[in-house]
Image (spheres, rainbow, N blue to C red):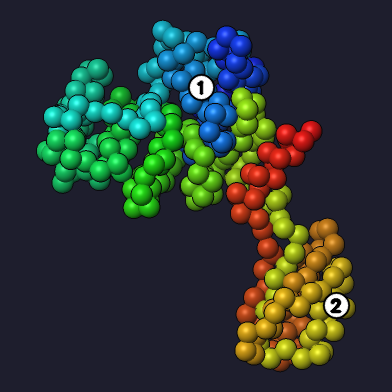
Amino acid sequence: MAPAISTKGLTKRFRSVDALTDMTLEVPQGSIFGFLGPNGAGKTTTLKLLAGLSRQTAGEAWVNGVPVGLQGAHRAQIGYLAQEPRFYGWMTGRQTLAYVSSFFPDHVTPARTNELLDLVGLAEAADRPTKTYSGGMRQRLGIAQALAGNASVLLLDEPAASLDPLGRHDVLQLMQGLRGDKTIFYSTHILDDVQRVSDHVAIVDRGRLVMTAATSDLMQRSSAGTISVAVIGSTPNVERGLGEIAGVQDVRIVGRDGDEWRYELTPVDGATTSVQVAVTRLAAEQGVALTTNRQETLDLEEVFLRIVNEERAA
């Protein structure tokens, strides 16, 4: 299946400032694709180029195979949410969606408006002026207007930024509900959001693509390289047995909490699974309760910092 979004050498220069340089990536159909980077990394610039709101200095981009351009037909393929969207405060949510939908004659029906309001969880607030909406409600209304044209690709610029925890939860839950039906390409600097909802991620820094990968693959490759083990009722035989397991390079006692002893094992490359199986067998043989036996992984923040720092040092 052709990618929902693809770019080749996409570049944007503002006089002497290189905002984006040689961006080449592909966004799979139906994915939630997190475009991750610090402030000023080039995320908003990329989204504006894809939305046709700015012209690239060099390179090409396509949405569902349609070339991107300022007056391009690709606009029928996309819905766009700007960072911190603004609405006419005197309009209700229903009136706002009806107004936006009027630009899409094939979709301007009361039923469609009601459907969108239900989808984003604003049916009960539909007839309230938008000036009374919370930040999370405005973001959800913004996503609804991005869906008004029934676009298959959504471009969302920092959709959960500046929201309180409840607002962030609502927006992320809405994005998850659209998984598979729509392709969502969204920028963010909030790493936890990417780890929670994205199935693919690209990391950008100082206008350059650092890497792109499936989120699960990225996390798998970024293992901390240790196994945490905890048992209740540890004995000298258990400690000695952990160190004698084939594939274990090192065993360290992490601490004790009552009858529970915690250890950290360092396996050789490729031996993690076999070591965990052996730990389970050892606990059963020694008659102790095994409460923890897991491979430790880095969270996305640690992965992000490691990748960006390595790139900057290169």
161 sits left or right of 92 in the view: right
* Image vertical order of residue 270 relative to residue 258, above or below: above
Give the residue at x 73% y 68%. 227
- Asked whether the viewer can see residue 31, the reply is no
Q: Nearer the viewer, residue 105 or 198?
A: 198
The answer to whether mark 1 and mark 2 are in CB contact below 8 A is: no
Residue position marked by numbered label 1 in the rendering: 45
Q: CA distance from mark 1 to mark 2?
A: 53 Å
Mark nearest the camera among 1 and 2 is 1
* Image vertical order of residue 306 relative to residue 285, above or below: above
219 sits left or right of 136 in the view: right
On the image, the x and y values in percent for residue 171 come to 36, 44
Circle 2 SS class: helix
Residue position marked by numbered label 2 in the rendering: 243
- Asked whether the viewer can see residue 236, the reply is yes
Image quarter in which the N terminus is found = top right
200 sits left or right of 161 in the view: right
Give amino acid for label 1: Thr
266 sits left or right of 116 in the view: right
* Image vertical order of residue 193 relative to residue 207, above or below: below
Give the residue at x 13% y 29%. 90
